[in-house]
Amino acid sequence: MSRWWQRLPLLAAIDWYVIGSLLLISGAGLLSMNSFGSQSYFFNRQVIWLAIALAVLVLASTVDWRFLRQSEVVAGLFIVSAIGLGLVTVLGVVVKGAQSWFSLGAISLQPADFMKLVLILVLAKYFSRRHIEIAYIRHILVSGLYAFIPFVLILLQPDFGSAMIIFLIWLGMIIVSGVSKKHLLIVAGIGFGAFLMAWLFVFAPYQKARIMTFVHPLADIQGAGYNAFQSMVAVGSGQWLGKGVGYGTQSRLEFLPEYETDFIFAAFAEEWGFVGVLFLFILFGVIIWRLIDAARVGASNFETLFAVGVVIALMTHFTIHVGMNIGLLPVTGLPFPFMSYGGSHILAEFLGLGMVMGMRRYGRAAHRDDMHNEFVGPQ
């Protein structure tokens, strides 16, 4: 017997496990960034962004997204997103050394966050049929071109962290689509070569310093390694139960920079301790579990691959953010999903979850194409 709220059109497709986990993770982020004085600015604005993002998620869950199976629609979204990335390198504002943002009065938007979602759509569409031909290297190259365009445009800003996410989304998608080990080794070689070229001709001095700090984390704790060192101190000082909400000295006394964005995990760990971090990981795991379940029951390869792509994007953000906060990875400035301050990444993440819910709701009405083992539905 269905509950009354499950019969409401706006709430019928909502996954309440996901919503509950989202609200708790986002709420923990709000508590971590809320403090006395001017820092309440971040808290107040983030509340507004979260309210908008939650509305976007609910609305997205009511949409029949099968129209995205049309190649021209996906291609149009990709072209518009690529143009946005190109324009931001000319018309955007510089924040923290990267020209990655469009300033729209009181708000700023980062096109790279939405390009990640569009790239997942493009690759899901491409491999939904061609997964049976993944053994051919041409499909690796063509799909790689789709990723290469935003990768280069984002590097030009320069935003190495977001460019790395673009690469990892593509890499994850070709792996789940069944790429051979031989081709995977070729990709690894190309990736290593691209890194060397970027080191020689693309990376700014501060980016090279961050990578060298990762290799020798304690070599320059008053200079390039300051952020990473203070982050590790914050995480370690949280111990088992943390110092308590509002009593994290590393963040409240501003030893830990950017604690509302790049180092929000460290700020959270200091105040909540190991037990709080474990609970945070469980909540994030619930979201990933629900996305994997949506992928498992996807009505078509397209829906399945899109859900998997969202998992890959969230997991790479999560892993890199936590890794750089505990000194296992170089500092790249990537946000913690659903938790770090910022409107663009919150909107893109909530939209992606809403789209998966909508696809799960409407995808079962499609018809099977036996030749390609694919539900094609309305074209």
Image (cartoon, helix red, strand yellow):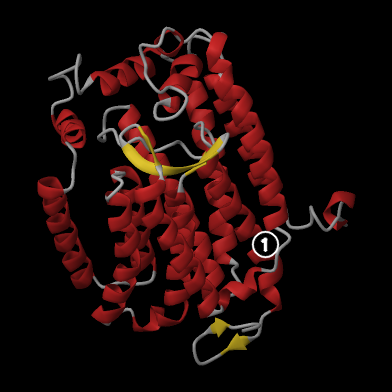
Expressed as whole percent of the image width and height from the top left, the position of residue 186 reads 17, 68
Residue at the image position 49 percent from the left and 35 percent from the top: 281
Three-letter code, disc 1: Gly
Residue at the image position 49 percent from the left and 32 percent from the top: 340
Decide: few, some or many residues near mark 1? Use Cα within 10 Å; few <14, some 14-19, many ≥20.
Answer: many
Q: Residue furthest bottom?
A: 371
SS at mark 1? Answer: helix
Picture quadrant where residue 23 is located: top right
Side of 213 where 7 appears, left or right: right
Residue placed most toward the observer, 115 or 310: 115
Side of 44 where 325 appears, left or right: left
Side of 123 where 143 appears, left or right: left
Residue placed most toward the observer, 231 or 328: 231
Picture quadrant where residue 30 is located: top right
Residue 167 visible within the image: no
Check the picture and name the quadrant holding the N terminus.
Answer: bottom right
Whether 367 is drawn above or below 352: the answer is below
* Residue holding disc 1: 358
Whether 56 is drawn above or below 70: the answer is above
Residue placed most toward the observer, 234 or 120: 120
Expressed as whole percent of the image width and height from the top left, the position of residue 135 reads 28, 80
Expressed as whole percent of the image width and height from the top left, the position of residue 255 reads 35, 11
Q: How many marks?
A: 1
Residue placed most toward the observer, 378 or 74: 74
Residue at the image position 46 percent from the left and 60 percent from the top: 81
Whether 273 is drawn above or below 98: the answer is above
Check the picture and name the quadrant holding the C terminus.
Answer: bottom right
Residue 367 visible within the image: yes
Expressed as whole percent of the image width and height from the top left, the position of residue 197 reads 12, 53
